[in-house]
Structures are given as C-alpha cells and as structure tokens.
Image: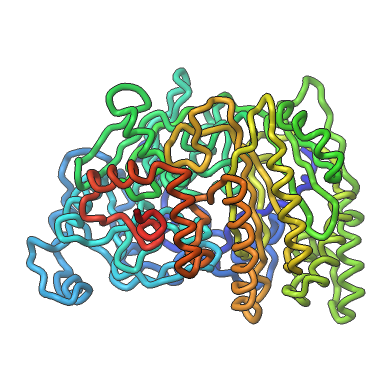
Amino acid sequence: AMASPMLRRCRPVVAEAPRWLVRPRSRVDGIAAACVPPLPSAIHGGAERPGAPARPGGVLRHSRWLQQQQQQHRGQRQCSSSGSPWLAGCAALVASVAAAHGSSVTRADSPPVEGEDSVDMSNWSGTHTLTTSVLFAPDTCEQLEALVAWASRVKQKIRPVGTGLSPNGLALDSRGMLSMAQLDRIINVDRDAMTITVEAGARVSLILEELRKHGLTLANFSSITEQQIAGWTQTSAHGTGARIPPVDEMIQSMTLVTPGKGTLELSERGPTAELFRWARVGMGALGVVSKVTLKCIPRYSLHERTFCTNSADLRKNHAHLLQTFRHVRYMWIPYTDTIVVVVSDVPEKGAVAKAPMPEEERVRPLRDLLRQLDSNCGSLEGDNFAQLREKLLRLDPLNPEHVAKVNRAEAEFWRRSAGERIADSTEILGFECGGSQWVLENCFPAGTINKPSLADIDYVEEMKRIIEQEGIAAASPIEQRWTSRSTSPMSPAFSEKADDIFSWVGVIMYITDEDHAPEVKDKFRDYAEKHVDLTFKYGGTLHWAKIDLDFHRGKRRLAELRQHLQRRFDVVGFQEHRRALDPNNIFGNRLIDVALRL
C-alpha cells in the first residue's frame, strides 16, 4: 500500500504509559503472552519525534499499588466463581480507608479489593484532571462482584474508568474510581458464528489484532483504537458510514454487574432484550460491564480516495457519496471554501491506487509560510505536515487572521495530497488527531439513506459563517462523519426508523503550548457554546464522551442543556433503570448526575 496522503490524527500521547492503563502482560484465553510495548513519548503525524516535549495524558503518576499487584499476579487468571487465595489477604488497609472516609471502619466494612488512596487522574489530552480518593482495580470477576456489593453497602463511589480517552473526562470522579485494566482477557473467537467474547477491559486494538488471526474484523471503529471495549460501547462511539451504526450495535450479549440486581446476563433477544438495549449505552451509570460478545464480519480491504471540493459542488454530489461509499468523511477548512473528502469502499478486482505527489511537494505551502512568518524557524527538513502546522499555530494560536493564513496553507496541502491507497480496513479507518486539543462533537438527524436532507451540509456552512462573523480562531478541520441509527435508547443516534441517518460534527482548538493553554481553554469555550447552540437548533445532541458542563455555565444554559436532553432521550426511563440497578448511585459522577437531573 502507498503511503497515506491522510494526516493520521487521533492517537493519544503520554509521557509514559500509566500502569493502570497498560498491563505488563496481555492475555489470550488466560495465558500470559508478550509484553505490551510502552507508548512513545511524543507522536506527530504518526511518527515519534525525538526530543519533543511530552504531552499530558493518562494517569499523572503511576499507581504504586497496582504495579505491585501486577508483579505478584502475572499468571493465569480466570473469571470464575472459585475462590482466590489473594482474596483472603484483602481485608487490610483499614487505617488508610478510615482516613479516606474520615471515620473509623471495621474489618467487616473494609473493601474486598485493596485500593490505592489519593491517585492523580487525567484524561488522555490532559484537559480534565483530578485526584480520586481511592482507585480500585479488581483482578477477577469475583472480586469485581464483591467490590460492587461492598461499595453499594457503604455508599462508596466507584466510577468505572477505561483508558480515559473521553475528552470530557466522563469517567473521572474525585470520590472513588474503578479501573477495569486487569479484566482484559480475550475469552473466545467463534469463526462460524462470527463473534468474539472478551472481558470489558480488552482494548479495541487488541481485539482487532486477535480477529485478524481468524480472518475477521469489526464492521467499524473510531479513529482511535486504544479504548477499552466497555468504555467504547458505553458512550455509543462511532466510525463513519451512513449505512453503519454506532459501535454499541455490535454487541450481541453482555454481562452487567449491578448492586441492585446482581450480575445480569443480557442479550439482544429474549426476556432481557429491553434492558439490554438500555445497558449498551449506559455511560457507566447502570452497572459495570464485565464481558461482551461482539458481532464480527470477514476481514476486508478498502480502496481510499482523497480529494478536495467546494460547497457548491459538494451539495450536488453529497447524496451520491453517502449512498455509494462504505465510509465517508469530510474535513471542512475554516476561512476557505475547501472541503477535503475522504471516501473508501471495497476495492474492485485488479484495482491500482493512484499515489499523490511526493511528501516534499505536499508540505511546501506550510514550510514556505513558516519561513515567511518566522525567519528563525531553523531547519525544517524532515518535518511532516502535523509538525509544520503545529509550529505555525504556535506563533499566534488565538489570532483569527493568523489561523486563517495557516488554514489556507493547509488547504493547499490537501489539494496537493489528492490520491488513493489500498490497504486493510484497520489501516484505513484508524487515523491520528494531531496534538493535544479541546474538542466538542455533536450528532443530529440528516434525513434517510435514500433521501439525505442536506441539513448536514447546511449545518457546517452555518457554523463556518459564525466562525468568520465572530472572528473565532478556528483551526482546521471541522470534521464530519455519518452513521445509521442505533436502537439503544441513550445513543445520540437513537431512532425507531431503520433508514434514518445521523451526522456527527466535531470542532477543535489545539493546545499548542503551556503558555497559551488557559487562554485557549477560554476561547474554545466561546467556540463550543456556538457549536452547542447550533446543535440544538438542528435538533441534535452531544456525544456522551464530549459533552462538557463547562460549555453550559450559568443557570440558563444548564437548564437549556437539560431540556434538550430530555427532549432527545427518555431520561425518565433511564433514571428509573438507574434507581433499580444502582440504588445508592455508586457509579454516577457530577457530569452524569447534573446533566441528566430531572
């Protein structure tokens, strides 16, 4: 396959892989396998850049307790009802638990799983950080069940956390958290039924790697694949393709550990089907997902085409693109009339990809602009597109005129990047997001697959007009993707009509350096509020992993958020299930409780 003309955008970047996120040994069928390699210190455009400053991400410091437990328990671990010798020693730390809760705690009240006190936590981009009073990481399903029962009894928060990729810090809570990093087994692959059963802590990337061995893959996935499978599906994450639903629709059955109803086996068919649909997208608030079985499809290749167009021509061709290609996404470049179109489909027999021009020629517009604006920029040899754009934005990241110049240079880069490639779907669909950034993504109805409404095109054109009128320093891109509907009541793409389609639009601001970070946050809040207001105007809602209460400050804006959520979702029904499954609200956090308050 040729080198991709696409910028590989969204890989999370960490200074060092935190131990609660990355196991020292991965497992397939309970057997210890090769070590997981550490993540690089800095990634730009898909390549490590030596000497680059480490970006924030993951846990801010290692969990010392978890390191010790991983060293002691690297052998085979089973999800069974049998006892564990390790459990007998887990009644310790009474004094530290008492200190954390400000009162004396008896042995009977001590947790069945030892936790670590006062752990500094962060999402991958470093935009949300806090210190949680205690972090638990159960090693078996039996420990998980015991921990959930104990936490409900003593009213201890254990907010479930995956890899912390949600830009809004959806999994964070200062009162207590639960990591599923140790429950990451790939349990079974059924080639005939085309399913895979995994524990909730298994990463999407490892699932794809295992499926590859069996000639299978997932129907779709997000631009990033480092999520744990439970967190990925609980937020109704998505890839792109107007005929492909969000990822929660891949789930065929699941195990949900709850304090109110015990451990539940839920399936898309039978007496548990209704609760199953609610639980697929529960944002971690209905219970802890411990196991899922996913539908798979035969492994396939994609023929990707990248080209540029303008608004007028896109309107004419939009319906054809959505209806013709398996995967479609647009990257709108603010302050220009350039839209980058990326489409892909299964290649025809004998197809040959038409390569773009060499990298050196593609990045020339950005290199020339940087030398023009910064005579002391030094040697730029070897810098790729992402590195050059970052250097340009860092010069004056909040000046809309400067950002517009950078965007125009980027538009020329994409025009020179028109080309094709043919590769496995896992290589085509995953792409990097550039550097650390603020992001807000919405989801709104866009007609049907047979008759797109063009509301999706209207939306971004109106957003671009607002950017220009308000003088917002909006860097490229405004990214737009599509899915078909979901039957999960809390999915942003929920619909009872099978042929409905939904558009997902994300806006960003890059955090180019620490000096500008506070001001970037303030400016992005203004930008995000415009995005929110337009979302509600178009009858949409916000991605559960990106909705942020900071963009709804003040009584009026918060009330509007709740009103729109209650119009879009059956919040009453969701809260009824919460009360039944989690009567003491050990899984909720401020974001969930405030946004969904009736």
| Horizontal and vertical percent position of residue 205 | 53, 44
Position of 101 relative to 168 (above/below): below
Front one among 209 and 365? 365
Front one among 205 and 98? 98
Residue at image coords 83%, 34%: 316
Front one among 592 and 41? 592
Residue at image coords 31%, 37%: 255
Residue at image coords 71%, 55%: 463
Residue at image coords 89%, 80%: 375
Q: Quadrant of the N terminus?
A: top right
As drawn, the residue found furthest toward the top would be 192
Residue 492 in the figure: left or right of residue 422 = left
| Horizontal and vertical percent position of residue 35 | 46, 51
Position of 462 relative to 236 (above/below): below
Viewer can see residue 287: no
The count of marks equals 0
| Horizontal and vertical percent position of residue 346 | 71, 26
Residue 291 in the figure: left or right of residue 496 = left
| Horizontal and vertical percent position of residue 276 | 35, 33
Task: Describe the colour scheme in one phrase.
Answer: rainbow
Viewer can see residue 396: yes
Front one among 199 and 458? 458
- Quarter where residue 12 is shown: bottom right
